[in-house]
Amino acid sequence: MKTPRIIIAMLACAAATSALAWSQKGHDTVAYIAENHFTPATADSVASLLDGMSPVYWANWLDNASHTPEYKYTKTWHYKNIDEGIAYEDAPLNEKGDVVRAVREQIAILSDASAPRADKVLALKILIHCVGDMHQPMHMGHLSDLGGNRTKVRFFNRDANLHSIWDGSIMNSGHAWTYTEWQKQLDRLKPEQEAAEIKGNIDDWAKQTYEIATRVYELTPAGSNLSYDEVAQWTPVIEQQVLRGGLRLAHILNTIFDPSYRK
């Protein structure tokens, strides 16, 4: 019996949604948490550059843009691959760029008073996305397996790979929340806790994500079958990383756009 075309289409859409779940819901949440922590001056500057649109509107733009001829130069800007046994500081640099350098470059453009408005608009859109990517552990995964894409695992007895389950499967299994609900539930730190999370620099934050990725590899060898125990184990890590991404994005933009914030 042939599978009806409508069922095939539905399955394809479901697979696509799952593959992009971190990229959509996770990035939306990072952007929304950040938006909730903008100072008034930062909120005005961001709104001006984005023509009144929320950062959430642009949170996933780069995932699609990187596949277009105009922005294909950003394809490697979503990750920084570091193989097992190599210290973060010793990792070879990808000549085409990586997520850490991309974040730094956009900060430099946004901080440059002489930069053209069009350059700043593009830099802001890229920064919103890349800060989120920098906090997804598999975006700091091994070069040898393309950030977990070649590490085959199973998720509730279904074929998957390590990258895909971190993109969305674990997140969606942990909580069936909208991005606004994710923000509402996670964004509750006390001022001193928030200060601790935004402490450090871009490399400190990237290295922290890389260390989580190292732990994920150690505990999830190829062939693993992840289910309820692993969802319970890793969901708090995803919550933490999404919240960090949002708070740190706000911190970056507040530092750039609000002189009083830096005092």
Image (cartoon, helix red, strand yellow):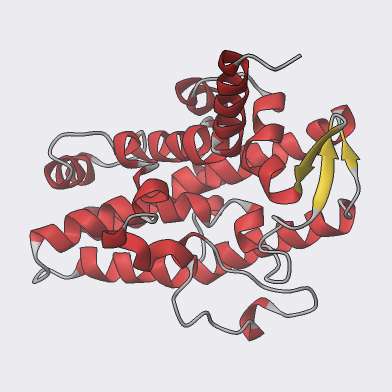
Q: As rendered, which of 103 and 184 lies closer to the eye? A: 103
Q: As rendered, which of 68 and 148 lies closer to the eye? A: 68
* Residue 180 position in % (x across, y down): 45, 22
Visible in this render: residue 202? Answer: yes
Residue 154 relative to residue 252: left or right: right
* Residue 235 position in % (x across, y down): 72, 35
Residue 49 relative to residue 125: left or right: left
Visible in this render: residue 250? Answer: no
In the image, residue 70 above or below residue 97:
above
* Residue 32 position in % (x across, y down): 39, 33
* Residue furthest front as drawn: 1
Q: Quadrant of the N terminus?
A: top right
In the image, residue 212 above or below residue 59:
below
Residue at left offset 61%, top offset 22%: 8
Q: Quadrant of the C terminus?
A: bottom left
Q: As rendered, which of 241 and 200 lies closer to the eye? A: 241
Which of the 4 quarters of the picture holds residue 165?
A: top right
Residue at left offset 45%, top offset 54%: 131
Disc tally is 0
* Residue 59 position in % (x across, y down): 37, 41
Residue 110 relative to residue 149: left or right: left
